[in-house]
Amino acid sequence: MRPGPAIGDTFHGLTPRSNAGGVYIHWLVESKGPEEIVKSVAPDRSDSTQPWVELAPDYEQARSRYDSLDRLVEWPAQRECLGDVNGRSVLDLGCGNGGKLAELVRAGAGASVGVDISGSFITARPSGLELVQGDLSELDSVAALAGRRFDRIMFLQSFGYASDPIRTLRAARAMLTDDGFILLTRTQPIRYALERAERNETSLGEEYFSRAAYSYRSSWNDQISLSKLPYTMSDLLNVFSAAGLWIESTLEPQLSEDARRRYPHKQAWMEKYLGILIFILPLRAKCKRAGGALMLLRLFRSSRMIQRLNRTTCSCPRKKFPMCA
């Protein structure tokens, strides 16, 4: 993703483009699924989230299809990554209609909150589920989140909505419990590079590193024209790091063997465009000894150092490092 800087700012060395109408900032706004939207902001007008508000019902209809990739591969993988949610509080940022969060609460999750700009929520809500209309770019302004902490915070194909992604991730990070984590998913960036290369008759590498926006009509609603800005893996990793998070694990979910046989057209699509990335992002360097040890491992790579670290004990609650076991 190429997240959006504030007007007049730079982001990893890139500056906003100028045109005759003034300075426009374009950044990726990823919707819930295969489509993505670009928001445009000019100095003389405020940000608009209208495209997603209009597309939200079309997305929910597409997601409910029997052969949607969200049903077949994405949500099952996301659900597995969340682990045991019994008694755990969950915050879903960009929750759509709130259906996934409702499923988690029915499975035993504790008091949980879903936030979405559209405000088009399910009406049948289990006890303990609160769905509120709000902008994930302005989490400090969402009254329902004031003073709250959560064991799991989810950005399920919604992270691109953040006008300032680092600020949004830092705000989410501040709401994590000590042993909590953020579950964040993004579309494989190679997919878009391949689509552009096919359309423009260029190379994959040229399009992967391109910074030029491109537009098309949504497959959910052909009356709405969408634009995209390309992003690379380094873009994603740099944002996570700047927000004070580290990657505990990454998953690239694929269709099950049964689903491959039943839906060969979906398998053909996955083989070509790869699908999504799922990141588990806990607080960076929660354990000071573990964080320092990792730095030393990177610097020295010495067997003596590794042996010493393996003999070190630590009370880090996640127990993810040799010295923390």
Image: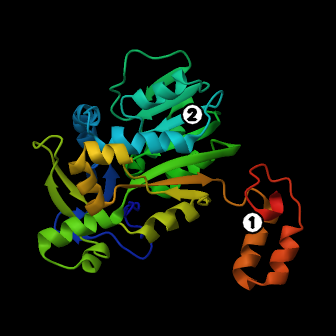
Residue type at numbered disc 1: Gly
Circle 1: element type: helix
Q: Quadrant of residue 132?
A: top left
* Residue wearing tag 1: 291
Q: CA distance from mark 1 to mark 2?
A: 26 Å
Q: Quadrant of the C terminus?
A: bottom right
Task: Report the front residue among 18 and 200.
Answer: 200
Q: Taking 75 as reference, is 199 left or right?
A: left
Q: How many badges with numbers are in the image?
A: 2
Vertical position of residue 123 compared to residue 233: above or below: above
Label 2: which residue?
90
- Image quadrant holding the N terminus, namely bottom left
Which residue is drawn at the image coordinates 54% and 15% (left, top)? Answer: 127
- Pinpoint residue 94: horizontal percent, then vertical percent: 41, 39
The mark found on residue 141 in the picture is none
Q: Residues within 10 Å of mark 2 (few under 14, many from 20)?
A: many
Res. 310 in view: yes
Residue 3, above or below 122 = below
Q: Residue at x 66, y 54 (%)?
A: 283
SS for callout 2: strand
Mark 2: amino acid: Val
Q: Is residue 181 left or right of residue 62?
A: right
Residue at 46% from the left image edge and 45% from the top image edge: 77
Please tell me whether residue 108 is drawn above or below residue 46 in the rendered image.
Answer: above
Image location (x, y in percent) of residue 198: 15, 70
N-term-proximal mark, 1 vs 2: 2
